[in-house]
Amino acid sequence: MMESYSPNRLKKFFSPRHIAVLGATANNQWFGNILANAFETGFDGRFYPVNPRADEIHGLTTYKSISELPDDTVDLAIVIVKSSIVMDTVGELVEKGIKNVLLVSSGFAETGKEGKGQQDTLRQYCKDKGVVLMGPNCLGFMNAPEKVSVFSGRAVEGTLIPGGVAVIGQSGATSEVITTKILKKSLGISLYITTGNEAIVTAEDCLEYLVHDENTSVITGFIEEFRNIEKMKLVAREAARRKIPIIILKIGSSDKGKKAAVSHTGALAGNDAVLDGFFKQVGIIRVETIEELAETAAVFSRWRLPEGKGLGICTFSGGMCGLYADLCEKYGIELPQLDEKTLATLKALLPDFAQPDNPLDVTGSGFLHGMNEIVRALVEDEHLDAIVTVCIPPQGEGDFFSPIINESFLPLLTTTTKPIVPITFREMNDYARDDFKDKGFYYIENPDLGLKALAHLINYAEYLRRLDG
C-alpha cells in the first residue's frame, strides 16, 4: 500500500488546479457555495462538474459521467452524492486514476451502526487503493496562500487573507465561526481544513502536515476526538521543536458534550481528565471557548515568546490594578516586585502621592510626567519579561489625547525583545480598530480573555525552556 499521508502527497491534495465535482447541481447550495468561495479566494484553476442530466450548471459545461472526464488531468474530486452510491462513485474515480477525494456527503458513522459499517467498508477500500480521502461529512478546505478553495459552506465572514494561522475543524459549522473570529482579529489564514468523520485523513494527519508547512506559524483546532494519541504525541513534540504552538478547543468534558461528539462525527470521546494531562505533557494549549481560541491565536501571531515568567502591568487606575492582579492570580501569571533601580526612576517621574508597585498605578495625573519614560523603565526592569501597558483607543482624527499615551509604547515595540501588550482603557470603535490594525499590533480589549491568552503565551514559553533544559 502506498504512503497516503506523506507531506508531499497532502501538499498536492491541498493545492489542486483541476477539480471534478460529482453530484454537481443547481438544485442545492453546495456546488454554488464551492464556486463562490473559489472565486473570492482568487482560484485560477478549473472545475469539471459531473451530472448526467444537465448540459451546464452555473455557466460551466458538465460531463455526463466520470469516464468522460479528461485523462490524467483531474487532481481532486469532490463527491456530493447520496451515501448509498458513494462506494460506486469512488470506485469509478479510482478506475479513472483519480485518488484524491473530498467527500462532502453525510450519512455514515455519525448516523449509527449501519452508517458506520458503510464507512468502515469505504475506509478499507481507500486504504487498499491508496486513496487520500477527506470526510465523509465535511465541508472541505480553503488554502489561502495557494488561492484554492473547495469549501461547501458559506458562513465564514470576512475576507480570507493569507497568513500564518491554520484552522482544523472536525465540525465544519463550528470551525466557520472560529475562522470568522480569527479573521476579525485581522489575522491571516494559511490553511483552513474541515475533516468530518475522518474515514481516512485524520486531524492528526493534518496537524502533522501543518507542523511542516512553511506558511503556518500557529495551529488552531476544534477537536471532538483524537483517533491516534501516539501519532499526536510525535506531532506535538515536533511542533514544540519548531516552536509552532498548537491551540486546541476540545469538547467532551461533560457527559452531554461526549454524547454530542458521538452523534456528530461518530467519534468516541475519551477520558477528559487524562487527555487534559496529555495536553500539558506535550505542550498543547487547551482552550475552553471559541473566543479564547481566537484571542490566544492573536497573541501568538503578534508577539514573540517572553524569556521568563514575570509580567509588569501599567495603568491609570488603582481599581484596575486590583482587577488585573486578581486575573493574573487566577491564571497563574507572576507579578514580580520591581527592582530598586526601577522604583527610583518611577518615584522621580510620578507625583509624590503615587506608590510605585506592580501592577503600577501612574495615577490620574502621573501620565503627564513622562509616560514614555515610565513604560521604558518597566521594559528595562530585569525582573520583568513582558509588559502590559495602558493604551487609549483613538476616537477619530481630532483625538489629541490618545497619541500622548500610545506614543509611550509604540516606538518600543520594535526596539525590545520583550513583548509589550497594550490594554485598552476605553471602548473601541471602528476608527480605533482600523488604526490599530494598520499599526499591526495586538491589543487586549477584554482583560479576562486577554490575560488568559497571555498566560498561555507565558506558559508555552516556559514549557519550551524546560524542553531545552
Image (spheres, rainbow, N blue to C red):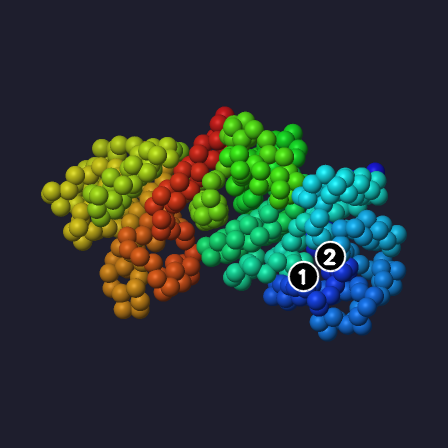
Q: CA distance from mark 2 to mark 1?
A: 8 Å
Q: Position of residue 11 (x, y in %)?
A: 70, 49
**Which residue is located at x 30 percent, y 47 percent?**
389
Q: Position of residue 231 (x, y in %)?
A: 66, 33
Give the amino acid at mark 1: Trp
Res. 100 mark: none
Query: Do the CB atoms of the residues marked 2 and 1 lie less than 8 Å apart?
Result: yes
Q: Quadrant of residue 233?
A: top right
| Residue 377 as seen in the image, left or right of residue 174 | left
Give the amino acid at mark 2: Ile
Q: Quadrant of residue 337?
A: top left
**Which residue is located at x 42 percent, y 61 percent?**
438
**Which residue is located at x 45 percent, y 32 percent?**
462
Looking at the rendered image, the quarter that the N terminus falls into is: top right
10 Å neighbourhood of mark 2: few (<14), some, or many (≥20)?
A: many
Q: Secondary structure at mark 1?
A: helix
Q: Earlier in the sequence, mark 2 or mark 1?
A: 1
Judge whether residue 342 can be spotted in this image.
Answer: no
Along the line of sight, the residue nearer the viewer: 40 or 64: 64
Along the line of sight, the residue nearer the viewer: 242 or 11: 11
| Tally of numbered tags | 2
Which residue is the site of mark 2?
80
Along the line of sight, the residue nearer the viewer: 152 or 70: 152
Which residue is the site of mark 1?
30
Depicted 341 relative to depicted 403: above or below:
above
Q: Secondary structure at mark 2?
A: loop
Q: Position of residue 315 (x, y in %)?
A: 25, 46
**Which residue is located at x 77 percent, y 72 percent?**
56
| Residue 182 as seen in the image, left or right of residue 428 | right
